[in-house]
Every structure is written in structure tokens, then in C-alpha cells.
């Protein structure tokens, strides 16, 4: 498993845009005794060798909630990395196909992870931009390999960014005041992680309501939510998690932003010690770029301007911290609701990525 995780370190050794994971965390995420996703999913991991040298890897994944409860007979593949040799891609993806056929699945799609909280898609445009801790990086030939092997584009995602100066603080302050009064809602902010923890489970409920109709969404169990909290809350500044609640203090909207850890993870080189943790803590305190990781609004409050409250809070926080750039995680190109939220900021698409599908 360590070989599986370390392969991209050699593949992208001299690439300035690839962002490495923390090796220990990555290995743990593939351990069924540590990651509760394996309660509802299974995976097999493959490494390709050529002349006794590792030249590729892939994870073959079945999410049984998706297959059995949603009746989506999909064979997933992820953590797909290869040298520029079509034969390597072919032999790895054929193993994924074999497993799909053995389980009577209808098609394979990837690269994707176990569920919606994992990374997704290969990069198809924007190779000259640094990645993030929550996206995969790859060179242009990945797309070529998949298409030559008969895969077709299934879902397309955009990654946009905009300078914080594009945010009109007065506009959002004005509309925030109006929306709060009209719908009897209020903003909630935190400075300590322990204070926001009671709301995190409700955040995932809102996430499921707001994204449940998307074709990519797979329900997330309570144990997976607990795992998410343990794994990611250390990377989250409590003041970067914003909530909106109704008159009864019921959560109706949230937004989760993270400092950009890209440069810090490159310096860490896959380890927390002796200096990796220092770089990550520095980025958490001082990063001037932020990643909009998740944003969700209860359907009952959508198209009511609730996002104005969230952005009003962020303008104040970002001004205090001197934030320069806001970067968005991959969003489906057909997710019109989320596109409406961002339209006021004149975002610039700087990356494009896709998943690819092939019938079995």
C-alpha cells in the first residue's frame, strides 16, 4: 500500500503543480479498519510494473449504497496514475473492468473516490495551475489514454477563482440585512472548533438536502461524517465555517472554506515530521488564498438570497486576514444553482476536469 501511495511522488517529482498528500493519512484512508467508508464499499488496489519498475496504479471501487439502494450499477475507479504508455492504462483499467463484470455491474466511471467527499475527475484543462489538497493533478495524456481506450466524457466540472477585491462588501451587507429581516434568519460564527462541533452533523443534513438531486450524490453515513470531522477539522479555521439558522436555531445554510495548503503540502513532501506540520500550521494561520470547499442551502431557502448572509460574514473575516484570492473546488457545469451564487464575483474558469465512462 505504501508503494501504491508513493508512486505519484516519483511520477510528479519535478512537476511544480502537483500537490502531494500526507502519506500516513492516505494509507489510513485505504485501511478498512480505519476508514468507515468500507462499511458500505469495497476496493481493490493495483500497481503496474514494467521492467521491475512501478509505472502505474489504480483503485477499483464499488460503493454498495450506490449499487443496491440507488440501483446505479456503477464500477468506480480512482487514484489513477500512469506514465505515458497506453499499455499501462489498458492493463490497469482492464482489471477494473474484470471486477465490474464479476459483480454484474453495467459501466465503469472515473476517476472518482468512494463518495462525494473524495477527489473526482481528471484534469482536462488548466495544467499550468497548482492543484489543491482536494483535487487530483495529472498531465494532458490521461485524457488521451482514456479516449483511446473507448471511454467517453460523462461529467464535466469547472474550477473557478476570483480575487477577493471582486466582492462588493457594501452590496452583501445591504442584502444580508434585508434577507435576515425578511426570512427571520441569522448568521452564526465561531472562533473555537469545539463550539461549532454540535452543528457539523446538521451541516451534512443540509448538504444532503441541497445536493441530493445531483446525479453524482451518494448518501453519507453517520460514521463517515464522524470520520470526516476527525480527518479534516484540524485543517479548518473555525472562523472559516459560516452557518445560517432560522428563528428556531435550525441550520438552513452553511459554507466551509479552507486556507490553501498547496504550497505547504509541497514543502512537507508527504510527511508531518520533522517540518511538515510546521508548514501546515503556518499556512493555516497565514495563507492569503482560500478554497471554497462546500456550500449548501436547504431547498426551502434556495433562491431567497441566503448566500448574501454567508458572503457578508466572509467579507469581514477575509478583510481582517488579508485574503487575496478565492478558489472554488470542482463544480458540475450543469449545477445552475451554484453558478447563480457565484455570478456576482466575475469568476475566471482556470481549470476544467471530467470523469469518463465506459460500458462493461
Image: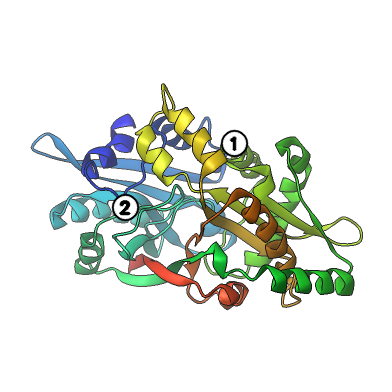
Is residue 207 visible to the viewer in this orientation of the structure? no
Q: Indicate the quadrant containing the C terminus: top left, top right, bottom left or bottom right.
A: bottom left
Is residue 143 visible to the viewer in this orientation of the structure? yes
Residue depicted at x 76% and y 76%? 304
Gap in angstroms between the C-alphas marked 1 and 2: 34 Å
Q: Taking 102 as reference, is 187 left or right?
A: right
Q: Taking 86 as reference, is 299 left or right?
A: right
Q: Position of residue 316 (x, y in %)?
A: 69, 57
Sequence-first tag of 1 and 2: 2
Q: Position of residue 345 (x, y in %)?
A: 56, 72
The one nearer the camera, 339 or 218, is 339
Residue depicted at x 65% and y 39%? 226
The one nearer the camera, 164 or 299, is 164
- In what element is the residue under mark 2? helix
Q: Residues within 10 Å of mark 1 (few under 14, many from 20)?
A: few
- In what element is the residue under mark 1? helix
The vertical placement of 7 against 90, above or below, is: above
Q: Which residue is mark 1?
A: 234
Question: Which disc is residue 84 wearing?
Answer: none
Q: Which residue is mark 2?
A: 96
Q: Residue furthest right?
A: 248
Q: Position of residue 40 (x, y in %)?
A: 55, 46
Residue depicted at x 83% and y 74%? 178
Q: Position of residue 167 (x, y in %)?
A: 60, 68
Amino acid at each position: 500500500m505504501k508503494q501504491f501511495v508513493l508512486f505519484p511522488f516519483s511520477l510528479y517529482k519535478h512537476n511544480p503543480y502537483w500537490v502531494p498528500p500526507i502519506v500516513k493519512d492516505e494509507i489510513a484512508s485505504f485501511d478498512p479498519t480505519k476508514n468507515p467508508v468500507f462499511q458500505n464499499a469495497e476496493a481493490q488496489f493495483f500497481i503496474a510494473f514494467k521492467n521491475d519498475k512501478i509505472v502505474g496504479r489504480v483503485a477499483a471501487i464499488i460503493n454498495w449504497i450506490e449499487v443496491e439502494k440507488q440501483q446505479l450499477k456503477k464500477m468506480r475507479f480512482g487514484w489513477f496514475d500512469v506514465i505515458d504508455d497506453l499499455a499501462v492504462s489498458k492493463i490497469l483499467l482492464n482489471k477494473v473492468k474484470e471486477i465490474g463484470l464479476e459483480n454484474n455491474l453495467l459501466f465503469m466511471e472515473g476517476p472518482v473516490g468512494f463518495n462525494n467527499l473524495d477527489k473526482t475527475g481528471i484534469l482536462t484543462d488548466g495544467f499550468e495551475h497548482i492543484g489543491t489538497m482536494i483535487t487530483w493533478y495529472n498531465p494532458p495524456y490521461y485524457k488521451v489514454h482514456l479516449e483511446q481506450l473507448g471511454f467517453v466524457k460523462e461529467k464535466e466540472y469547472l474550477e473557478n477563482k476570483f480575487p477577493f477585491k471582486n466582492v462588493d462588501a457594501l452590496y452583501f451587507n445591504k442584502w444580508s440585512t434585508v434577507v435576515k429581516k425578511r426570512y427571520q434568519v441569522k448568521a452564526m460564527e465561531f472562533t473555537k472548533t469545539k463550539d461549532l462541533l454540535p452543528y457539523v452533523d446538521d451541516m451534512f443534513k443540509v448538504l444532503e438536502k441541497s445536493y441530493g438531486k445531483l446525479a453524482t450524490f451518494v448518501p453519507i453515513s453517520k460514521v463517515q461524517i464522524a470520520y470526516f470531522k476527525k480527518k479534516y477539522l484540524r485543517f479548518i479555521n473555525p472562523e472559516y465555517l459560516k452557518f445560517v439558522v432560522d428563528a428556531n436555531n435550525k441550520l438552513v445554510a452553511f459554507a466551509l472554506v479552507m486556507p490553501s495548503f498547496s504550497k505547504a503540502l509541497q514543502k512537507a513532501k508527504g510527511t508531518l515530521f520533522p517540518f511538515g506540520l510546521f508548514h501546515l500550521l503556518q499556512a493555516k494561520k497565514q495563507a492569503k488564498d482560500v478554497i471554497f470547499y462546500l456550500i449548501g442551502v436547504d431547498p426551502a431557502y434556495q433562491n431567497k438570497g441566503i448566500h448574501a448572509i454567508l458572503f457578508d460574514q466572509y467579507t469581514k473575516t477575509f478583510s481582517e486576514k488579508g485574503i487575496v484570492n478565492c478558489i472554488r473546488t470542482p463544480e458540475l457545469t450543469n449545477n445552475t444553482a451554484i453558478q447563480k451564487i457565484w455570478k456576482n464575483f466575475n469568476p475566471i474558469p482556470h481549470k476544467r476536469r471530467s470523469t469518463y465512462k465506459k460500458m462493461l
